[in-house]
Image (cartoon, rainbow, N blue to C red):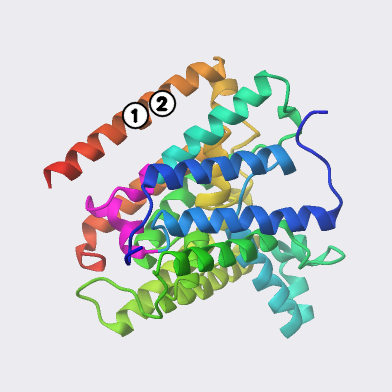
């Protein structure tokens, strides 16, 4: 039997709640319900966000490709986050702007609200409003929204190199960043 | 445990990574967040004005299913809320407050929280997800989407932080 497993809808939703509980637990305990820590990287005062984010990416990516190589997980049945180059480049930049203004992203706003922050609830309402604005404008921006599709493109496939070769760059990038951030924090 | 005694970001990050890996392995996709907000907005709209909600083509993906609220990301977000609530209580970190930068008034904070949220909500739809669904899940899959999003998000954030120092410092 290879993963991912197949469940009924009810079991799937129960698993969603359980996995979500762990998601929320690690976000809050990592300090990611706190907008000062969430925005610290952009002011070079607190590097919690890149440390948590790149550690999580490294752990999950290493596990994912290891399980796939060991034939314990069928990668062709894992839904790969699709790429639409230009919309995601612009979307990412707009997202970064909104992130610094509000001090949250969608998941961390929920974690912030769960730790008693009223401003996080206001941001959650804003995210709903922003989704509504998108739905209203959708007929006018549909062309751009659907432009530059690359389906489930991954860096190893696009670059035509082994996923472990890409991972070496990811390890080096994260390791280098962690080293510089720790050194900078000690100095200040 | 004393207030604000958070875990090492590397420990929290490893826990988050294992949660994401478990999600890939068990259900076959990654974690998400922003689509739950879009879904709830679409469903809320359909309760207020069914005709208007149906006229918005983008929301039809949520409304033209048998039970719109039986949604995987929505249930995951409900779990996220209770996981974070428990964690905040364990850490003695739960407190009702309007959190803001040191030099910011309450009115300004409400504006930045809501306005920033609007940008995030719009940007997440354009990018097909947010820091959870695209940056973290896509990044860990080595998907092109995840890495484009991470890079442009940091560039956008650094520019705003440089132009608006008073927001958080």
Residue drawn at (83%, 28%) of the image: A1
Q: Is residue A66 placed above or below A141 in the rendered structure?
A: above
Q: Nearer the viewer, residue A146 or A72?
A: A72
Residue A7 image offset from top left, x and y in percent: 84, 47
Q: Nearer the viewer, residue B32 or B19?
A: B19
Taking B127 as reference, is B106 left or right? left
Taking B12 as reference, is B126 left or right? right
Taking A21 as reference, is A106 left or right? left
The quadrant of the rendering that contains the C terminus of chain B is bottom left
* Circle 1: element type: helix
Residue drawn at (34%, 46%) of the image: B155
Give the residue number, with chain letter if any, for mark 1.
Answer: A175
Assign the magenta stretch its main secondary structure.
helix
Residue B70 image offset from top left, x and y in percent: 78, 64
Residues at circles 2 and 1 in contact by the CB criterion of under 8 Å: yes
Magenta region, residue range:
A34-51
Q: Is residue A43 placed above or below A167 in the rendered structure?
A: below
The quadrant of the rendering that contains the N terminus of chain B is bottom left
Taking A107 as reference, is B104 left or right? left
Q: Are marks 2 and 1 on the same chain?
A: yes
Q: Is residue A49 magenta?
A: yes
Name the chain under label 1. A
Residue drawn at (65%, 34%) of the image: A152
Q: Is residue B139 magenta?
A: no
Residue A128 image offset from top left, x and y in percent: 57, 71
Q: Nearer the viewer, residue A176 or A27?
A: A27
- The answer to whether residue A140 shows anywhere in this view is no
Residue B156 image offset from top left, x and y in percent: 35, 51
Farthest residue, direction front: B1
Give the residue number, with chain letter if any, for mark 2.
Answer: A171
* Circle 2: element type: helix
């Amino acid at each position: 039997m290879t993963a991912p497993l197949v469940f009924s809808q009810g079991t799937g939703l129960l698993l969603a709640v359980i996995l979500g509980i762990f998601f929320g637990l690690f976000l809050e305990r990592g300090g990611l319900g706190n907008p000062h820590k969430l925005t610290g990287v952009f002011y070079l005062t607190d590097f919690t966000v890149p440390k948590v984010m790149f550690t999580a990416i490294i752990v999950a990516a290493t596990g994912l490709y290891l399980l796939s190589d060991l034939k314990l997980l069928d990668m062709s049945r894992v839904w790969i986050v699709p790429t639409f180059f230009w919309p995601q480049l612009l979307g990412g930049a707009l997202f970064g702007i909104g992130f610094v203004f509000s001090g949250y992203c969608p998941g961390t706003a929920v974690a912030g609200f769960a730790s008693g922050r009223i401003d996080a609830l206001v941001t959650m309402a804003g995210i709903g409003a922003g989704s509504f604005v998108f739905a209203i404008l959708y007929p006018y921006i549909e062309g751009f929204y659907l432009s530059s599709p690359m389906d489930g493109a991954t860096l190893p496939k696009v670059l035509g190199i082994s996923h472990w070769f890409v991972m070496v760059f990811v390890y080096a990038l994260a390791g280098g960043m962690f080293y510089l951030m720790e050194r900078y924090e000690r100095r200040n | 445990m004393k207030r604000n005694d958070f875990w090492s970001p590397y420990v929290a990050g490893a826990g988050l990574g294992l949660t994401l890996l478990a999600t890939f392995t068990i259900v076959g996709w990654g974690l998400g967040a922003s689509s739950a907000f879009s879904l709830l907005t679409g469903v809320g709209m359909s309760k207020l004005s069914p005709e208007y909600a149906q006229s918005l083509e983008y929301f039809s993906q949520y409304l033209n299913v048998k039970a719109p609220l039986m949604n995987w990301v929505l249930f995951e977000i409900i779990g996220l809320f209770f996981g974070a609530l428990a964690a905040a209580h364990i850490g003695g970190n739960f407190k009702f407050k309007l959190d803001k930068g040191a030099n910011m008034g309450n009115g300004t904070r409400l504006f930045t929280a809501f306005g920033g949220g609007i940008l995030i909500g719009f940007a997440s739809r354009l990018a097909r997800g947010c820091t959870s669904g695209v940056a973290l899940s896509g990044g860990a899959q080595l998907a092109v989407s995840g890495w484009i999003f991470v890079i442009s998000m940091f560039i956008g954030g650094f520019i705003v932080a440089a132009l608006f120092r008073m927001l958080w410092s």
